Amino acid sequence: MSEALKKIITPVDGSEGCAKAARFAARLAKAVGAELELVHVYDSTVISVMGLNALTGKEIDDAVQRVSKAYFEGARRAMEDDSVVSREVVRVGSPSSEIVAFAEDEQPDLIVMGTRGHTEFKKLFLGSISSQVLQHAPCPVTVVR
């Protein structure tokens, strides 16, 4: 089994579901000797809805980095052992599309994610992020409740 799982990615968004997924992913990575990459996707629609598009590129980047840092810290706190985390990556765009694109770029053996994040309103109209990732990911996806 450990030869089958060398890289796991886990999307983080600060939600309780994300914390559970991060804890599960860290335990699994440690048990099988895999590396774990955390990815936060800052939803690009938030930038325009909140009027952030009036800011300079650097100001937007700074805001995205601050928010992402808090989400990464929360995920690490949820893990019993965060020593398996090899890196943290921030992307901007549609969360489900960016998670799938990141997986295509990184070619992980597994994506571990929560069932419910901070996108309940969007879920009513677009379907959940986890559902979209399940349908389009280039690798297996484990959804943690």
Image: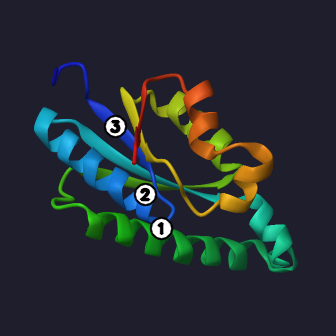
Circles 2 and 1 in contact, beta carbons < 8 Å: yes
Q: Residues within 10 Å of mark 3 (few under 14, many from 20)?
A: many
Q: Residue at x 53, y 77 (%)?
A: 66
Report, in whole angstroms, how far the alpha carbon at label 3 lies from the one at label 2.
14 Å
Left or right of 87, for residue 60: right
Q: What amino acid is found at the position of numbered circle 2 in the picture?
A: Cys
Badge 1, how many Cα within 10 Å: few under 14, some, many 20+? some
The reply, left or right, for residue 100 in relation to residue 140 is right
- Number of the label disc, if any, that sits on residue 8: 3
What's the mark number on residue 14? 1
Q: Amino acid at mark 1?
A: Gly
Q: Nearer the viewer, residue 21 or 42?
A: 21
CB under 8 Å between discs 1 and 3: no
Mark 3 vs 2, N-terminal side: 3
* Pointer 3 with pointer 2, Cβ within 8 A: no
Along the horizontal axis of the image, is 121 left or right of 132? right
Q: Give x and y (percent) for residue 135.
A: 61, 26
Rendered residue at 60%/36% (across/down): 131
**Nearest to the observer: residue 144 or residue 90:** 144
Q: What residue is at 40 percent from the left and 66 percent from the top?
A: 72
**How many angstroms separate mark 2 from mark 1 (CA)?**
6 Å
The label nearer to you, 3 versus 2, is 2
What's under tag 3, amino acid-wise?
Ile
Q: Does residue 74 sit above or below 135 in this rendering? A: below
In the rendered structure, find residue 18 and report the number of the disc placed on it. Answer: 2
Q: Is residue 38 above or below residue 100?
A: below
Whole-percent x and y of residue 20?
34, 56
Q: Position of residue 73 (x, y in %)?
A: 36, 71
For residue 97, above or below residue 104 = below
- Mark 3 secondary-structure assignment: strand
